[in-house]
Image: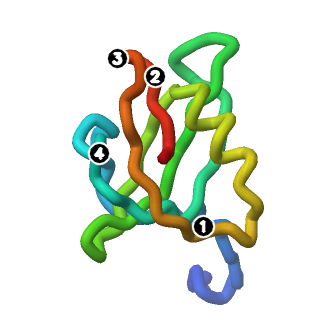
């Protein structure tokens, strides 16, 4: 007898992040809705983290990756019941990204 996968009743954890990746530079000075986020250790840069944002723009969900420490600091201060929220990402001092 051959097993059927559905009989194993395996449930996977979903990251909950859906949509195509979009470069953060394409979002500067445009209002977006931040739905969720996660911060993880970078696999590319030693001793650093990166931020993954689940956003929505014009009704379309997208995913954004960034190493911006300022954005990580800001989003960590948003209470969980503060999501989703509308914001704009701006570039300050020609190098620093911030939520406004």
In the displayed structure image, the side of residue 20 where residue 34 appears, left or right: right
- Secondary structure of residue under mark 2: strand
Q: Is residue 6 above or below residue 78?
A: below
> Which residue is labeled 1 in the image?
14
At x 52% / y 27%, what residue is drawn? 68
At x 66% / y 88%, what residue is drawn? 7
> Which residue is labeled 2 in the image?
96
- Labels 2 and 1: the sequence-earlier one: 1
3D distance between C-alphas at marks 2 and 1: 31 Å
Given this view, does label 1 or label 3 mark the residue nearer the observer? 3
3D distance between C-alphas at marks 1 and 3: 36 Å
Local packing at callout 3 (Cα closer than 10 Å; few below 14, some 14-19, many 20+) is few
- Labels 4 and 3: the sequence-earlier one: 4
Q: Position of residue 89 (x, y in %)?
A: 40, 43
3D distance between C-alphas at marks 3 and 2: 6 Å
3D distance between C-alphas at marks 4 and 1: 31 Å
Q: Point out which mark residue 94 bears.
A: 3
At x 40% / y 50%, what residue is drawn? 88
> Which residue is labeled 4 in the image?
29
Q: Is residue 22 above or below residue 84?
A: above
Q: Is residue 49 above or below residue 56?
A: above
- Secondary structure of residue under mark 1: loop
Q: Position of residue 98 (x, y in %)?
A: 49, 36
In the displayed structure image, the side of residue 1 where residue 31 appears, left or right: left
Local packing at callout 1 (Cα closer than 10 Å; few below 14, some 14-19, many 20+) is few
């Amino acid at each position: 007898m051959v097993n059927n996968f559905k009989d194993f009743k395996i449930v996977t954890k979903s990251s909950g992040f859906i949509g195509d990746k979009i470069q953060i530079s394409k979002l500067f000075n445009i209002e977006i809705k931040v739905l969720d986020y996660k911060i993880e250790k970078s696999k590319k840069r030693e001793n650093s983290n990166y931020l993954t944002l689940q956003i929505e723009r014009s009704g379309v969900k997208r995913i954004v990756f960034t190493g911006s420490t300022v954005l990580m600091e800001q989003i960590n201060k948003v209470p969980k019941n503060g999501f989703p929220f509308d914001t704009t990402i701006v570039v300050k001092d020609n190098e620093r990204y911030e939520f406004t």
